[in-house]
Image (cartoon, grey):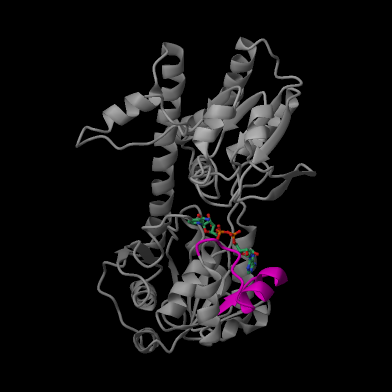
Amino acid sequence: MPEATSKKAAPTPMADALIEKAGRRDALFGIVGLGYVGLPLAVELAGAGYRVLGFDISERVVDGLNAGRSHVKDISDEQLAGVVRAGRFEATTDMSRMGEPDAISICVPTPLSKFKDPDVSYIVAATEAVKQTLRRGQAIILESTTYPGTTREILQPALESTGLRVGEDFFLAFSPERVDPGNPTWQTRNTPKVVGGITPACARVACALYQPAIERLVPVSTTEAAELVKLLENTFRSVNIGLVNEMAIVCDKLGVDVWEVIEAAATKPFGFMKFLPGPGLGGHCIPIDPHYLAWKMRGLNYKTRFIDLAGELNTEMPLFWVRKVAEALNLQGRAVRGASVLVLGVAYKRDIDDIRESPALDIIRLLEGQGARVSYHDSHVPCFTEDGHEYRSVALTPEVVGAADCVMVVTDHSDIDYRMVQRQAKLVVDTRNAMPKEA
Ligand SMILES: NC(=O)c1ccc[n+]([C@@H]2O[C@H](COP(=O)([O-])OP(=O)(O)OC[C@H]3O[C@@H](n4cnc5c(N)ncnc54)[C@H](O)[C@@H]3O)[C@@H](O)[C@H]2O)c1
């Protein structure tokens, strides 16, 4: 059974030493996985006064970071170069250096397998690397989103197989990352951070380590609770997006403007939270994380119905919108086959460059499958490769817009001149309500 941190914490000398080091900022922080999550965390910790040693398996990522070049949009080259120059951040591919840091945060990917089951192989690989050099006095904190039980069932036994004891010799916690790429208001520092430890001492150590860099820490009683917090947050979004996507289908059948209905409903000052429909889910979190929970619960003979239904609805949205393109072309006497469709935006959300799980990829595949000639424009994504086919963003000129049989707004990037699109396009299918409204 999970141990509760609410029990009277039994301080250990190792924990106190680490907490004191954190207070003096002379702990060395290791970050494993320097992507969308790991790099902002590393820069925030370095900015708070820690020295940070970043680990990544990609030489390209490591070489770029050591040269002060950021591959993550939320971190500017200046920010990164500042902490590199100050000697507070260094990146390496040399996993044998894992013994150096006092604290190690693991921020590696947690994708799905081909059959939509959790793929924790990156967590396992990172844990193995940590294990090789695990020493007394280290704190290990898993940040990757995963199913409840991962920290206790995968990390703890692997790390304790060294003979060291959790909560006494080393400390183990789970603290989910909540980064929202492209969000100008909520960043690593001012977004409250949930922490759950395997033992009370583990939780105390993890909170003390993050405290200089994060404004508000939210301790919970177990690692399982912390793991589930993240899955609840993302399942909440998936279910509510599923609901408004269903509302979009309902409104379409009723001939009602779904966005007008939602905006009006959102004037209710209590008991309603605004979610918006769209072309489907994207990104590394919301389309994936609920599957982690559904998988875990299947193993406990429980079917997560809300999660499954929302997943179904959200996955069907690209097809719904491709049907809208077909209907719109049909009204103009055209078939999808042979029509040229210009897709505006392929990133999974506004003003970012991430195309992972983007519904635009499904939409392009579906349109091409029906014989359309598809091009795209996205200033954040100059090119990408999908199914071995390379796509390049076209310039968004009045001529290009005017030449397309249909323009489809898939991502509502703020740098697109929607008025020009409205003036020039023969036909627009807008999955995001981005087009200007007629007076
Ligand atoms: N991207 C988001 O918005 C977001 C938000 C909250 C939580 N998360 C979660 O955070 C985790 C990381 O996501 P991300 O978006 O930062 O992924 P990412 O793909 O951007 O970065 C992961 C990095 O880890 C590196 N890596 C892989 N295996 C490694 C290993 N064994 N040792 C060292 N480095 C390794 C990769 O080379 C890559 O640079 C995931 O669990 C994700 O669900 C992501």
Query: Could you tell me if residue 316 is visible in this image?
Result: no
Going 47% across and 55% down the picture, which residue do you hit? 182
Which residue is nearer to you in this view: 260 or 35?
260
User: Is residue 300 rendered to the left or right of residue 382?
Assistant: left
Q: Which quadrant does the N terminus fall into?
A: bottom left
* Snapshot quadrant of residue 247: top left
* Snapshot quadrant of residue 238: top left
14, above or below 201, in the image: below
Residue 176 on the magenta segment = no
Which residue is nearer to you in this view: 400 or 240?
400
Q: Which quadrant does the C terminus fall into?
A: top left
Q: Count the labels in the image.
A: 0
Q: Residue furthest right?
A: 388
305, above or below 331, in the image: below
User: Is residue 378 rendered to the left or right of residue 294?
Assistant: right
Query: Could you tell me if residue 236 is visible in this image?
Result: yes
* Snapshot quadrant of residue 358: top right
Q: Residue furthest left?
A: 269
Residue 70 on the magenta segment = yes
Residue 145: x percent and y percent?
50, 56
Going 31% across and 82% down the picture, which residue do you hit? 11
Quarter of the image where ligand 1 sits: bottom right
Residue 92: x percent and y percent?
65, 79
The residue segment tinted magenta is 53-74
Residue 369: x percent and y percent?
74, 26
Residue 208: x percent and y percent?
34, 78
Going 43% across and 49% down the picture, which residue do you hit? 231
